[in-house]
């Protein structure tokens, strides 16, 4: 269904224009990442004399002091027992950081848990884990398409970087009807479509078609749903080959939202010269599909010995080449930054629903961060288009080489190692718990210093003692409780930080490491994009009325409470009408194969119901303003209700 022809609400200048003048998170002349001195003489590959002892044995046991008699800083501990294919890159990163690895796990809690696939790899109650609950489900092709489509309804111009998509089999008849109508309006239009299985990866099950009726020949859609999209027929070519870009994006925090983009990425090339799709070449996967896992089986695949040649190169080498031809690479980077931020904003609302289900507020649990792989295609006009988002991008730094028929050996891949080790190492540097702990201690001490006139010397020492006991206790119980320090941080910022705070935090052993390869883009550019975060406010309403902790679906009682508390029922919209709306929308979404483990209204169904209520209440406004007005209306009445409860509680 076409989004309504509504203009967005008045806002600040276009993000693209604002970002164009900003410093991009990379440039074609960026120097290659250098190894720290300790790692220059060896590849640090596999077990060796410099490896940490296996299975958590104490490494470098001694008197616990550094040369010069200074006490050695406690090393960050990392559980790598679930790292899977990212293990080699992780090991190199930990050696460069001189952190303590536990490759077989550890009975005591670790500071960081590095999982290869899922947040649910094992039970974790403290520390940090490199996966968000629900992320794997969120970036599946159907869920991603629905999330972006919701934003396209609200902001069609801002979200035109994602190809027009249809979900199969639910929208099969609608897809055929819409394409038939478009062809009738323009007989010269001869589109190509690409079909992607929902749960597919590494190019598995992807194929091209010229007509919607061709989908029926494949069968199996009921058992394996898919997304069908318009195929991008005019990509940018290099050496007459089609290529895509794998960019690594760090979602460091969900609340508050914090996003980083790697300054370099990978460019994966097809292995046959590109031609626009025809009935004759539709099935030539080495021409149309850029997936590394497919093209590596082509006889034309060239393993890269450096960043500038071969079938896999660094993105910075492509930017160098484009820059030499007069392309404004800052504008290219600006558009990519915009695409990444907007995509994360589209994913965030439902991701928060999953997060509260697995780690409800007040329950001990870890904090989360995650490296995502964004697959982006540059069109001939240099406009970036989002192909997909990967929750578990490959972090392998070697590839298989066939020595003789049927005999393979893993050999290093310099291009992969250059990009991926830097991404993992600098992700760890950004989430370093020692930095956070030291910063929080300084916050507590500084607050005490500001308020010293309120205490006698004895009471200060007593109060310090209590603060540190409580501080250490809640660090041990759950790193999520660091949220309780946020108020102190804000007071610190308002009062002005002491001169020593920044010096103490930055004086670490990182001086020998290269500068960070990850560049913060949010909240750095928050002012340009905050107007897009409407649906996050809808998610806050949904989560508030879920009722039972650990659920992701809203029951009929919760929906009625939402309507009643927000004053949305009246003579024209009775509670009986509310029940009918709930039943109709919930039944339709449940029939689409949405998670049947629990009954109730799922997040997507609630969004549809909310949009319906907004259109019903504010008929004369365009959709974005309808939704924003209803959010304001609901938040106002809930704030009034909360204030009344607070007054009653005090009474």
Image (cartoon, rainbow, N blue to C red):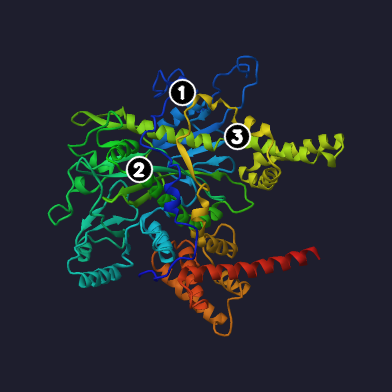
Q: Which image quadrant: the C terminus?
A: bottom right
Quadrant in which residue 450 is drawn: top right
Q: Which mark is residue 329?
A: 2
Q: Is residue 263 above or below residue 1?
A: above
Q: Is residue 357 visible?
A: yes
Residue name at image x 39 percent, y 22 percent = 43
Judged from the image, the secondary structure of the residue bearing numbered disc 3 is helix
Residue name at image x 53 percent, y 50 percent = 257
- Please give left or right for residue 363 compared with residue 584 in the image: right
Residue 7 location, x and y as percent?
A: 43, 68
Residue name at image x 42 percent, y 52 percent = 17
Q: Rounded to the nearest whole Å, what is the CA distance between mark 3 and mark 1?
A: 20 Å
Name the N-terminal-most of marks 3 and 2.
2
**Residue that carries the numbered disc 1 in the rendered image:** 36
Judged from the image, the secondary structure of the residue bearing numbered disc 1 is loop
Q: Residues within 10 Å of mark 3 (few under 14, many from 20)?
A: some
Q: Rounded to the nearest whole Å, what is the CA distance between mark 2 and mark 1?
A: 29 Å
Residue 57 location, x and y as percent?
A: 54, 24
Q: Which mark is residue 298?
A: none
Q: Is residue 254 above or below residue 167?
A: above
- Please give left or right for residue 77 compared with residue 220 in the image: right
Cβ–Cβ under 8 Å for marks 3 and 2: no
Name the N-terminal-most of marks 2 and 1.
1
Q: Is residue 85 above or below residue 158?
A: above
Name the N-terminal-most of marks 3 and 1.
1
Residue 27 location, x and y as percent?
A: 38, 37
**Residue that carries the numbered disc 3 in the rendered image:** 435
């Amino acid at each position: 269904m076409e989004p309504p022809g509504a203009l967005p609400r008045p806002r600040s200048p276009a993000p693209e224009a604002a970002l164009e003048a900003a410093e991009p998170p990379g440039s074609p002349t960026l120097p290659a990442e250098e190894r720290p001195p300790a790692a220059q003489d060896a590849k640090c590959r596999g077990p060796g004399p410099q490896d940490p002892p296996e299975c958590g044995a104490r490494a470098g046991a001694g008197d616990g002091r550094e040369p010069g008699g200074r006490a050695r800083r406690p090393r960050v501990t990392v559980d790598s027992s679930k790292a899977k294919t990212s293990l080699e890159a992780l090991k190199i990163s930990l050696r460069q950081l001189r952190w303590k690895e536990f490759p077989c796990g550890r009975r005591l809690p670790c500071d960081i848990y590095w999982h290869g696939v899922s947040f649910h790899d094992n039970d974790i109650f403290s520390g940090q884990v490199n996966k968000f609950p629900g992320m794997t489900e969120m970036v599946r092709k159907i869920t991603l398409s629905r999330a972006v489509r919701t934003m396209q309804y609200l902001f069609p111009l801002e979200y035109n970087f994602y190809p027009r998509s249809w979900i199969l089999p639910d929208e099969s008849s609608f897809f055929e009807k819409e394409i038939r109508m478009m062809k009738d309006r323009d007989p010269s239009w001869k589109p190509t479509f690409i079909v992607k299985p929902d749960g597919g990866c590494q190019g598995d099950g992807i194929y091209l078609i010229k007509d919607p009726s061709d989908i029926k020949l494949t069968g199996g859609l009921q058992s394996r749903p898919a997304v069908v999209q318009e195929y991008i027929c005019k990509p940018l070519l290099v050496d007459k080959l089609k290529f895509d870009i794998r960019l690594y994006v760090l979602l460091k925090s969900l609340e508050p939202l914090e996003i980083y983009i790697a300054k370099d990425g990978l460019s994966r090339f097809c292995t046959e010269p590109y031609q626009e799709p025809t009935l004759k070449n539709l099935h030539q996967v080495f021409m149309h599909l850029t997936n590394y896992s497919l093209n590596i089986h082509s006889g034309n695949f060239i393993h890269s010995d450096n960043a500038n040649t071969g079938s896999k190169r660094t993105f910075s080498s492509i930017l160098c080449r484009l820059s030499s031809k007069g392309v404004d690479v800052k504008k290219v980077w600006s558009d990519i930054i915009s695409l990444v931020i907007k995509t994360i904003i589209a994913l965030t609302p439902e991701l928060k629903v999953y997060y509260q289900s697995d780690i409800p507020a007040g329950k001990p649990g870890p904090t989360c961060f995650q490296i995502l792989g964004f697959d982006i295609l540059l069109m001939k006009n240099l406009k970036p288009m989002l192909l997909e988002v990967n929750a578990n991008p490959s972090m392998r730094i070697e590839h298989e080489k066939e020595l003789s028929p049927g005999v393979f050996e893993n050999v290093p891949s310099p291009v992969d190692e250059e990009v991926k080790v830097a991404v993992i190492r600098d992700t760890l540097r950004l989430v370093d718990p020692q930095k956070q702990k030291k910063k929080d201690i300084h916050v507590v001490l500084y607050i005490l210093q500001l308020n010293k006139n309120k205490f006698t010397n004895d009471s200060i020492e007593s109060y310090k003692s209590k603060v540190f006991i409580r501080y250490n206790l809640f660090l041990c119980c759950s790193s999520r409780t660091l949220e309780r320090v946020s108020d102190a941080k804000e007071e610190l910022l308002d009062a002005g930080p002491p001169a020593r705070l920044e010096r103490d935090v930055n004086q670490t052993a990182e001086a020998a490491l290269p500068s960070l390869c990850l560049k913060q883009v949010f909240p750095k550019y928050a002012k340009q994009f905050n107007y897009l975060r409407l649906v996050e406010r809808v998610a806050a309403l949904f989560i508030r009325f879920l009722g039972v902790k650990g659920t992701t679906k809203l029951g009929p009682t919760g929906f009625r409470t939402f309507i009643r508390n927000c004053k949305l029922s009246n003579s024209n919209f009775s509670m009986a009408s509310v029940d009918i709306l709930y039943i109709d929308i919930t039944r339709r979404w449940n029939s689409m194969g949405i998670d049947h483990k629990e009954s109730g209204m799922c997040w997507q169904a609630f969004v549809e119901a909310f949009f319906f209520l907004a259109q019903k209440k504010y008929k004369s406004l365009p959709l974005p303003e309808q939704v924003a007005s209803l959010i304001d209306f609901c938040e106002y009445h809930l704030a009034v209700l909360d204030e009344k409860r607070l007054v009653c509680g005090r009474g």
